[in-house]
Amino acid sequence: MVYELYSHYTLIYKSNMERLENTSNSTIANTLDPITEKIIGVIALIESIEDRSEKIQENIKQKSQNLFKDNLKLGFTYISNFIEIFSKFEDEFGEIAHKGFSLAYDLYEHYTLIYKSNMERLENTSNSTIANILDPINNQINTVIDLVNSNDKNLKISNDLKFDESGISIKTKKYPTLLKLVK
């Protein structure tokens, strides 16, 4: 666009100079050459800015994806910490602890769905990669359930909340329509 504007300006300048002052082409060229060089410099600068702008957009997109992925992973860290707290209960695992664990478990279930859909969308992450990320928390949940259920004084947690080797909860296998309702 800048170049087109300059081309029009040049045509107007040449025709006016030739008409008004009977100026030779070499005089016009000498006058326009420094301007031409500046225009070419401006065009090059604009092109480099556009190029950098595209790279910046890619950078921003990449950084936001990385930030988003980091936040997703950070969410799992917090959920894992919640579950860890329930594994360190003293005395007995009563109604309040049971309710807290249930809330943490529900949060984990929903967060897992969010994580899976976003990782598939952001990175085309395979199910096996996602499973590797979720396995430690799944095992942690299984351990808490076993620990709680091993003491008769405790309010029991359903074994249906445990996860199998493939990372699917027993509850989901028993009641597959529940998973469809959540999605």
Image: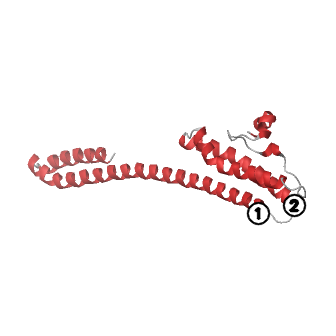
* Foreground residue among 13 and 106: 106
- In this image, 39 relative to 56: left or right? left
Query: Sequence-wise, which precedes: disc 1 or disc 2?
Result: 1
> What residue lies at 46% left-to-right and 50% top-to-bottom?
57
Which quadrant holds residue 91? bottom right
Nearer to us of marks 1 and 2 is 1
Q: Which mark is residue 88?
A: 1
Q: Position of residue 158 (x, y in %)?
A: 84, 46
Residue type marked 1: Lys
> What residue lies at 69% left-to-right and 41% top-to-bottom?
167
- In this image, 175 relative to 45: left or right? right
Q: Position of residue 133 (x, y in %)?
A: 61, 48
Q: Quadrant of the N terminus?
A: top left
Q: Position of residue 90 (x, y in %)?
A: 82, 66
- As drawn, 34 above or below 10: below
SS class, disc 1: loop
Q: Can you identify the residue that label 2 sits on?
A: 96
Residue type marked 2: Ile
- In this image, 28 relative to 66: left or right? left
Which quadrant holds residue 125? top right
Residue at mark 1 to residue at mark 2: CA–CA distance: 14 Å
